[in-house]
Amino acid sequence: MTADCLFCKIVAGDIPATVVHDGERTFAFRDITPQARVHVLVVPKQHHEDAAALAAADPQLLAEVLTTGAEVAKAEGIADSGYRFVFNTGEDAGRTVFHAHLHVLGGEQLGHFGRP
């Protein structure tokens, strides 16, 4: 846990969140500013700055984050209709929290990705 990390504090229970999944090594909760009807964040409980750092340090944990994302999609009822996974890395991607996290988005028709 990193003392000044928002997501570490959420995982520790120091900051409240609407929890969707609490596993041995992964944790999922609803985004407070959802960008789709379903918008859940999946994080490794262990702090890693971003997806690239997570992949380098613990590829198995990265796989568990993705597996948890798929389980969340199924539990949220969006597995059949479709969903999007997003990792934001770096300033140009709009990342605001420096703890690796997977966005699970769905529950409605999502727009095309990137520039028109």
Image (cartoon, helix red, strand yellow):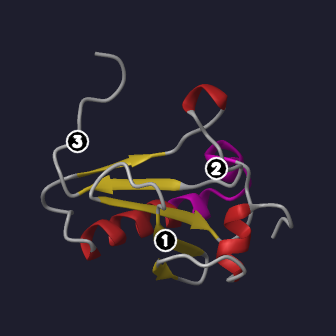
Q: Position of residue 35 (x, y in %)?
A: 36, 48
Q: Nearer the viewer, residue 28 or 6?
A: 6
Sequence order check, earlier mark of 2 and 3: 2
- Whether residue 62 is in magenta: the answer is yes
- What number is the disc on residue 29? 1
- What number is the disc on residue 55? 2
Sequence order check, earlier mark of 3 and 1: 1
Label 1 element class: strand
- Whether residue 9 is in magenta: the answer is no
Is 56 situated left or right of 20 in this image?
Answer: right
Sequence order check, earlier mark of 1 and 2: 1
- What number is the disc on residue 66? none
- Give the residues in magenta: 50-63
Q: Nearer the viewer, mark 1 or mark 2?
A: 1
Residue at (49%, 71%) from the top-left corner?
A: 29
Q: Nearer the viewer, residue 32 or 54?
A: 32
User: Which part of the image, by quadrant, shows the C terminus?
Assistant: top left
Q: Position of residue 25 (x, y in %)?
A: 61, 76
Residue at (51%, 44%) from the top-left corner?
A: 87
Residue under label 3: 110
Seen in the picture, residue 23 relative to 106 is either above or below; the reply is below
